Amino acid sequence: MSYTVFGRENCTFCDKATDLIEEKSHGYSYYGIDSHPWARTLVLKAGYKTVPIIFDAQGKEVGGYTELKEL
């Protein structure tokens, strides 16, 4: 299964999430909210306060690193 991850630079949990996805041989798309202004706008308008924000291939929100690890 592939994932979409919204994160930011120097975010320990963002790094852990992408490392975990890579470890399990799943693909992912990564959007940094610091380098993609549209991603930052999307995240803020959706009311998210923290990153990473992870979605599965069907668009269902997984949650953050802790929820991904439990999955």
Image (cartoon, rainbow, N blue to C red):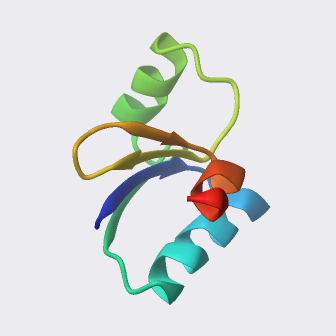
Comparing 45 with 37, the one in front is 45
Q: Residue at x 73, y 59 (%)?
A: 13
Q: Residue at x 55, y 59 (%)?
A: 71
User: Is residue 20 in sight in this rendering?
Assistant: yes
Q: Quadrant of the N terminus?
A: bottom left
| Residue 51 in the image: above or below residue 66 | above
Residue 59 in the image: state x and y as whole percent: 27, 39
Residue 5 in the image: state x and y as whole percent: 45, 53
Comparing 5 with 1, the one in front is 1
Comparing 19 with 71, the one in front is 71
Q: Residue at x 47, y 84 (%)?
A: 24
* In this rendering, position of residue 38 left or right of residue 40: left
User: Is residue 11 in sight in this rendering?
Assistant: no
The quadrant where residue 34 appears: top right
Return the residue found at the far left. Answer: 58
Residue 38 in the image: state x and y as whole percent: 35, 30
Comparing 56 with 8, the one in front is 56
| Residue 48 in the image: above or below residue 63 | above
